[in-house]
Amino acid sequence: MPSPRWILDVTEEPDGRSLRIWLKGRDGRVDEQVVEYRPPFLVDGETGRLDALAGELAGDPRVASVERCAVRPTLFDRRTRPLLSVTPARNPDRKRLAGELDARGGYVRFTLYDVDLAPAQLFYLERRLYPFAPVVEEGPGRLRALEPAATLEYEAPPLRSVPFAIELAEGRRDGIVRADDTIRKIRLGGIELEGPEEELVRELGRELARQDPDVLLTSGGDAFDLPWLYRRAAAHGLTEETFVLGRRRAPYRPARRAASYMTYGRIVHTDATYPLVGRFHLDRANSMLYDDAHLDGLVDASRLSRLSLQTVIRQSPGTCFTAMEMAHARDEGVHVPWKKNRPEGFKSARTLLAGDRGGVILLPPVGVHDRVDEFDFASLYPHIMVRRNLSIETLDCPCCPRSPVRAPGLGYRSCTRRIGLIPRTLGPLLARRLAYKAQAKDPARPDAERKRYAHRVKMLKWILVTAFGYQGYRNARFGRIECHEAINAYARELLADLFPAAEAAGYRVLHGIVDSLWLEPKDREHPPDPEAFARAMSTRCDLPLGYEGRYRWILFLPARTGLGVPNRYYGRYEHGEFKLRGIGSRRHDTPLLLRRFEGEILDLFSRAPDAPAVRALLPRALARARLFAEKVAGGDWPVEELLIAHRVSQPLVEYSVFNEAVAALRQLAHHGVVREPGETVRYVIVDRRARSWRDRVRIAELLEPGTSYDRGAYLELLARSAETLLAPLGVGRSALLEEWPEPPGPPEGRYRSPEAIGQRRLPAA
Amino acid sequence: MGRTAPTYRQALEERLRRWDSFGRLLTTPEERAAFERIRLGARRYVAQATYVGSPDLLESILLSVLLDLARQLPPPAEGAAHPASAPRAAARAR
């Protein structure tokens, strides 16, 4: 038997009717196989209409074949039905053709299945293969995987991953790039290439062939390196055929365009994507997953989801989860609906109000506390979905009208006869995460292995987190809003049940958020055994409650009203780690100055063994704050540490107020740079009272070492940061500002630029 | 969440904004401080009110405010008849 090889990737061929399979051997050799593959999609509808449609499509040149088939298309079907199976002549036409058929049916008479799965994804599912599968060849073009995708212990193919970056003349990279800037230097792995641009680009081609990496790892390659390189290559007369970054040619245009969209209440931006063929381009800057999951976690997710590594890294973990659901569904012969045609069921206003609620979120008592025990449910929501059998087809099923499993307060029933698609998908993921977590903590294993498991754990954690949110997402293929509501209802009941149980065990409830509890012993001399409490509660609720640790001290921080904020606290565990939530160091927009200040305060408090010791350290904390304030007021804090990052929320023209961020955007626009919503601008406040965008801030790209900053503005930011951290100890921002040195005011009678007049807003009528 | 109908938190804040005008015509600092305490009391029990999920916003607000005031009352003195036990005692006498 020939030694096994691994599938690296499956890519679409330009002819539109076949796929190319990329195989990697243990010796590092990469082979390719081209197989003809045109997957059909299915059309469901009344038999008469389907017959008519089949007749119409018979002579259509865009259709390779139309056949009648008998399948069980949805999770709700118990037996097979006759459907129409349409095979387009070219794979890239699948969606267009399907859209046209949908339109012919007036968007209501036909339901379409398997339309928007990538041909490679369908290929994997149909042939029982998956990315990075070890395979043997059983005949020409017939590959067989040696183990199932869900195998826990597997050998991943040795991927050669090299960092890749280009540098422009004058070292421009994060600065403002001009349209005619040329490439001066290219880094590939350990090699640095330099020279005249045209020669440089050609040399890169030779170096790529020599090193033959599997992965080009970039930081910003989608936004900058690849498009710029393609652009410069084209300027020297090179083409997609003659200058290739992958193992075969890929188009120079992006596979997907850049986009700004709203998610979880904030605007995010994704760059255009530039995947390669036969080689992976992984851009860590255009990925929310790489830094957590690394290659190990991404390869694991790619195996389970049947999505290419290049897709996994650029998509949200929710896409992975959906693909995993699809894989499970297809495994059972169920097909994937193109558009979800399942409107929310009719509900009374009272049920709507009762259902549309999240988990329990208490307001914690503001102040310094010690001897606090923290408990967390591990993956609570996925566990609830599995334990209570919550899935699109098992909720309020017609087969179990007397099911005893009902969502508290809402009454939605769970099926007791069969296990739903979601639990079937999630159950193995939960088990997998637990198994890997144990391996990652096993001290007998070498460090490198433990890290690999830890990366897989991180990736699975992300996937599990999104599994819940996707139940409420309007477009989720297998999502259903009632599942989302039921999960929340079970979770609320769980915490309401735990509070009295904790009191009975000798605790006082300090704080609780959805799946976490902070408890304080009633009797400080005889505190309850936390491990025993966690075990007892896990048994009682049939859900895994874990003991996170005991805090030496923890500060719950107040809102402006003086009441506690659920998600704003910091503390130190007895095992030495810190936990920070909702303070500056956790936010992306905080200047380094404030991070340093917070670091100093945390460092100072780190030696305190309990709450009184923290209070005793307050004078020293205030002295540190004053030192910071004096240096800031003196005007010689390094400006690059004062940069504020701001996430753009709308296009520049739509801003109706004038503030620092707008001034920064206008400075960028002046230099021909447009920032899309979801991207960030970084700037230093130069004069917060200036009415002109030229004077108010200085953007990072134009920052020079001598740039002066608005001392008053930064003193105020510092005071606000001190107040955030120290408010439970009675520190207020206005008192600090009064005590601190006064910054020098603006020079008398300074000339202000004439834009000021045009920018003044009209007074409100 | 919060798409179908405003969450209790959102509805409460909106109602409290409506109360702003009430506060503007209060003329003594004592009244204004007391008014602030009432608003704080309404905010203190958002978690509990959300858990009930009552369609009656004012019911939740009033309950929160009443509880906030009641918890500040001195506890009943030792030996004094607990108000809750009075009717039962009367029933036994009959």
Image (cartoon, rainbow, N blue to C red):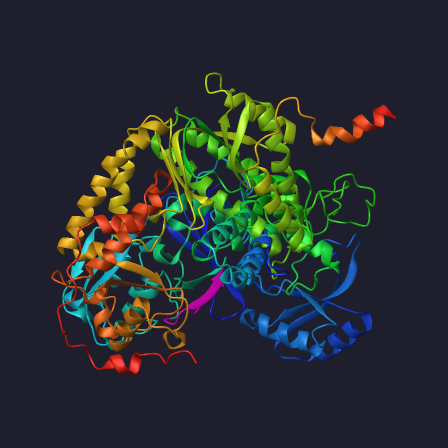
Return the residue nearer the eye: A584 or A95.
A584
Residue extending furthest toward the front: B28
Residue A194 picture location, percent across and down: 15, 62
Residue A257 drawn in magenta: yes
Residue displayed at 48% across by 54% down: B32
**A201 sits to left or right of A436:** left
Above or below, comparing residue B83 to residue A239 in the picture: above
Residue visible at 24% across and 69% down?
A: A696
Q: Is residue A3 visible?
A: no
Can you say which quadrant of the picture contains the C terminus of chain A? Answer: bottom left
* Segment colored magenta: A252-263
Asked if one can make out residue A7 in the rendered structure from this viewpoint, the answer is yes
Residue A453 x/y as whole percent? 43, 36
Residue A561 vs residue A11, the one in the foreground: A561
Q: State the residue at coordinates (80%, 28%).
A: B88
Q: Is residue A487 magenta?
A: no
Q: Is residue B86 above or below residue A749?
A: above
Image-quadrant location for residue A54: bottom right
**Number of marks:** 0
